[in-house]
């Protein structure tokens, strides 16, 4: 008889796109790692935080400086006009902080391909109205 881990491993490996196997732990209830433990012991957290800090610095520099519109275009290209450049220029310094909640998508173990924050609506209800 196949166990749950073997079943999940076989299912993922049967896809032509993936060969990483199943790398998660199964549980009936969520297992919450205390933030302080995760923050201190996880190299990935440091990497993601470094990326977020650099991204925020680039964004702030681009918002303050009109000379490089290419950076602003790539950072703001899908932003609704009501939340565009002029909106961000009116924000106070205290509004520019690192995200409290985010998740990463990985193509294989340790290879981050995407960092998502609540602005992408992943934590909101499926109606897209920001109601959770």
Image (cartoon, rainbow, N blue to C red):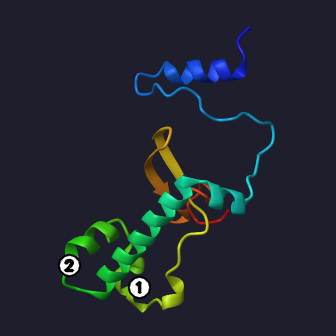
Instruction: Identify the residue at the far front of this view.
Output: 41
Q: Horizontal and vertical percent for residue 129?
A: 58, 65
**Furthest residue in direction left, as rendered:** 67
At 23% across and 86% down in the image, what residue appears?
66
Name the image quarter holding residue 60. bottom left
In the image, residue 117 lies at what x, y percent?
53, 62
Give the residue pinned by disc 2: 68
Q: CA distance from mark 1 to mark 2?
A: 18 Å
Q: Is residue 120 at least partly visible in the picture?
A: no
Give the residue drawn at x 53%, y 25%.
12
Query: Tag 2's secondary structure?
Result: loop
Q: Is residue 71 left or right of residue 41?
A: left
Q: Of helix, strand and loop, which one carries label 1?
A: helix
Q: Describe residue 126's horizontal placement relative to residue 112 as left or right.
A: right
**Count of numbered circles on the image:** 2
What residue is pinned by disc 1?
87
Q: Earlier in the sequence, mark 1 or mark 2?
A: 2
Nearer the observer, 37 or 132: 37
Residue at the far right in the pictured view: 29
Task: Depth check: give the residue in front, 43 or 6.
Answer: 43
Which residue is pictured at 35% across the width and 86% down the height?
86
Classed neighbour count for the residue bearing mark 1: other residues with Cα under 10 Å, few (<14), some (14–19), many (≥20): few
Give the residue at x 74% y 58%: 34
Displayed quadrant of residue 6: top right
Quadrant location of the C terminus in the rendered image: bottom right
- Mark 2 packing: few (<14 Cα in 10 Å), some, or many (20+)? few
Q: Residue 88: x, y in percent? A: 41, 84
In this rendering, the label closer to the viewer, 1 or 2: 2
Residue 124 is left or right of residue 32, and the answer is left
């Amino acid at each position: 008889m196949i166990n749950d881990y073997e079943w999940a491993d076989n299912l993922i490996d049967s896809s032509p796109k993936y060969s990483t196997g199943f790398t998660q732990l199964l549980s009936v209830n969520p297992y919450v790692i205390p933030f302080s433990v995760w923050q201190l012991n996880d190299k990935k957290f440091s990497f993601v935080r470094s990326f977020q800090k650099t991204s925020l610095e680039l964004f702030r520099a681009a918002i303050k400086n009109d000379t490089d519109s290419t950076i602003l275009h790539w950072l703001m290209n899908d932003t609704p006009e009501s939340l565009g450049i002029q909106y961000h220029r009116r924000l106070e310094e205290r509004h520019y902080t690192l995200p409290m909640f985010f998740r990463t998508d990985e193509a294989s173990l340790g290879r981050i391909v995407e960092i998502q924050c609540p602005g992408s609506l992943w934590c909101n209800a499926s109606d897209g109205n920001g109601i959770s």
